[in-house]
Image (spheres, rainbow, N blue to C red):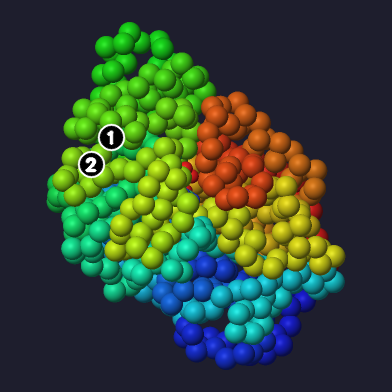
Amino acid sequence: MVKSTTTTTNAVDASPQGTAGVTTSDYDAIIVGAGFAGIYSLYKLRQLGLRTRVLEAGPSVGGTWFWNRYPGARCDVQSFDYSYSFSEELQQEWKWSERYATQPEILRYIQHVVDRFDLRDGIQLDTRVVSAVFDDEASKWTVTTEAGEVVSARFVIMATGCLSVTKAPTFPGLDSFDGPWYHTGHWPEEGVDFTELRVGLVGTGSTGIQIAPRIADQASELLVFQRTPNFSLPAQNRPVDDEFDRDIKATYAERRRAARKTPRGYPTPPFLRECSALDLPEDERSQVYEQSWNYGGPTFTGAFEDLLTNKEANDTAAEFVREKIRLMVNDPVTAEALSPTDHPIGTRRPCVDTEYYQTYNRENVRLVDLREGAIEAVTPTGLSTTEGDFELDALVFAIGFDAMTGALLNIDIRGVEDAPLKEKWADGPATYLGITVADFPNLFTITGPGSPSVLANMVVSIEQHVEWLTELLRYATENDVVRIAAREEAQKDWVQQVADRAEATLVPLARSWWSGANIPGKPRVFMPFLGGIAAYGEILEEVANNGYSGFELSTS
Ligand code: N01
């Protein structure tokens, strides 16, 4: 437990989730969010002996894997890697059924972890945090919930997720629509039956690409409204048989260690080349692409080391995928419309699919290219574009998220001198290492902007942050540190480094949610750290080894 001036103003509420009344309680740490990040934070901080409570807005644990329960939702990093590595027993006893697990299976896994490690009594569900205010004198946070509950804590850990605030559909006339409409990020728990319905799907990012084939299985007609085509790579999903399961588990710990030494946080197959795509003659280069394509998943964009830095090299990969699309989609006009030409491959989040392109060969599926006529309004009977009206019985919006900063800025976070985070980040997020913010002492952002987060295996990104933070809090505990504050200068340098790394690549050539471009009015700042998990891990280690350089640690 942190040896601090903490006084308990009320008995610590150890009641099960959702049963807490309006009380004032005092903790060592409050964690906001019970997804992968919040759950692991609770596990680690309890081990440290901190009195810790998780406040979760939803009625269940799981975070993004609770809310995004649309048909077709699955991870696009292999299940064996998209899972916690902290417990050898856990990873040996859990058996994934598919190479890329579905949302229900991942949610079951998260529930299992919570029970397996007796974490449930530390998680308070149905509790939305609305504000967090720093008390400069006491070096403590006061956290208030929507229900008016007030809790205080030395440390606040924002495990609020990078993709947890949905982008709301704002099409004029939506209220007048006669049929039901759904956002994929708030999918009804009981599911939706599209049988015999004409369905309009808006959005062709990772979500739209996953859900389209599943809607097409049911609907009498599916119209996919696409504004920007994305590159999508085949998952090459398959069931996990016992032999594969045994093979992975025989060297699981080694696999996990190796993953932390990669940029993306998962093992890379041996055929990826550490050279330029342009170093190989065309037939050999194509062979590498073919191998990566057949291997499946996002690995393709790492086939050569310069795909994200050299436009000419990138063009060879992009053209390979466009050629695949032409081969998979029977109608040449549709194939052309599905083929991205406005951004290099990998400069927007590559999608991973199962039978997405082939879906357009079905009789009941049609692509509507919004570049030829944008959506003007929702009408009582469907969608109206500048090129014509479409009659629809149901609408599905897969239009994305206010990513990375949305969940943090939805909470009224006030730091030193009552300064709102919203004002500090008016021109875009500024953090030190993606995990702390100057002038917001004792507040930590798991996979916050400025960390590898969404560019890597999220579970590895989360573990990296939580483990590093646990050691920092251990250090604080052992050294009577009550205030951990990032220095302004260190933050300035870090923000510059994050921007420089992005500038050195092709990512500025794309409009993407990575840089806030999907939300009108959001500052255009490339938010994640592009250096990768391994390099980032080394930086974190160096900061710690240097006595937490860049931080001011105060004992009173
Ligand atoms: O959201 P997106 P997403 N009119 O922002 C379109 C993760 N994820 O939910 O590109 C018409 O990528 C928009 O068009 P445009 C993953 O990191 C992971 O699909 O702006 N269209 C785009 O096509 C992913 O990257 C998994 O022109 C409009 C789409 O909606 C991230 O979540 C699965 C529009 C939004 O695409 C976000 O993916 C799913 C408008 N007004 C998601 N507004 C895994 O497998 C938006 N669009 C782990």
**Disc 2 + disc 1, Cβ < 8 Å:** yes
Residue 328 located left or right of residue 2: left
Marks 2 and 1 sit apart, C-alpha to C-alpha, by 8 Å
Residue 386 located left or right of residue 517: left
Residue situated in front as seen by the camera: 84 or 136: 136
Q: Is residue 3 visible?
A: no
User: In which quadrant is the N terminus drawn?
Assistant: bottom right
Residue situated in front as seen by the camera: 39 or 523: 523
User: Please, what is the three-letter code of the amino acid marked with disc 1?
Assistant: Thr
Please, is residue 192 above or below residue 401 in the view? Answer: below
- Residue at 25%, 39% (x, y): give it: 357
Element at badge 1?
helix
Please, is residue 66 above or below residue 438 in the view? Answer: below
User: Please, what is the three-letter code of the amino acid marked with disc 2?
Assistant: Tyr
Element at badge 2?
loop
Mark sitting on residue 232: none
Mark sitting on residue 334: 1
Residue 124 x, y percent position in the rendering = 51, 79
- Residue at 67%, 90% (x, y): give it: 10
| Crowd tier of the residue under label 1, counting other residues whose Cα lies within 10 Å: few below 14, some 14–19, many 20 or above | some
Residue placed under numbered mark 2 in the picture: 360
- Residue at 40%, 16% (x, y): give it: 277
Residue situated in front as seen by the camera: 162 or 333: 333
